[in-house]
Image: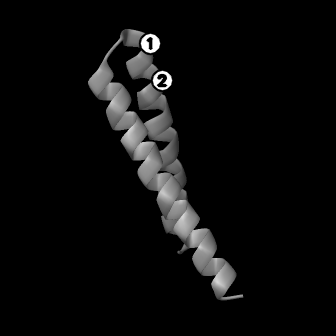
Amino acid sequence: MTATDKMTAKTKQAKGAAKETLGRAVGNERMTAEGRAERATSDLRQAASKADEALHR
């Protein structure tokens, strides 16, 4: 995973967390779920990246 990909994953992770928090604050279940999904997706990408880096060291 390149530095750009890592930065994109971190940005999406932060965006998802913000969306989830905002959704909870306003009581919007759909926004909360979307934020949770975005955060989970970026968490998985980050974990895959770390595993790939560990294998190639």
Identity of the amino acid at label 1? Ala
Identity of the amino acid at label 2? Thr
Q: Position of residue 57 (x, y in %)?
A: 72, 88
The residue shown at (58%, 79%) is 52
The residue positioned farthest toward the bottom in the image shown: 56
Q: Nearer the viewer, residue 30 or 9?
A: 30
Q: Position of residue 49 (x, y in %)?
A: 56, 71
| Residue for badge 2 | 21
15 vs 5: above or below: above
Check disc 2 and report its element: helix, strand or loop: helix
Picture quadrant where residue 37 is located: top left
The residue shown at (49%, 66%) is 5
**Marks 1 and 2, Cα distance to the nearest angstrom?**
6 Å
Pointer 1 and pointer 2: residues touching (CB < 8 Å)?
A: yes
The residue shown at (57%, 63%) is 47
The residue shown at (51%, 66%) is 4
Q: Position of residue 42 (x, y in %)?
A: 47, 54
Q: Position of residue 35 (x, y in %)?
A: 39, 35
| Residue for badge 1 | 25
Left or right: 57 as drawn, with respect to 32: right
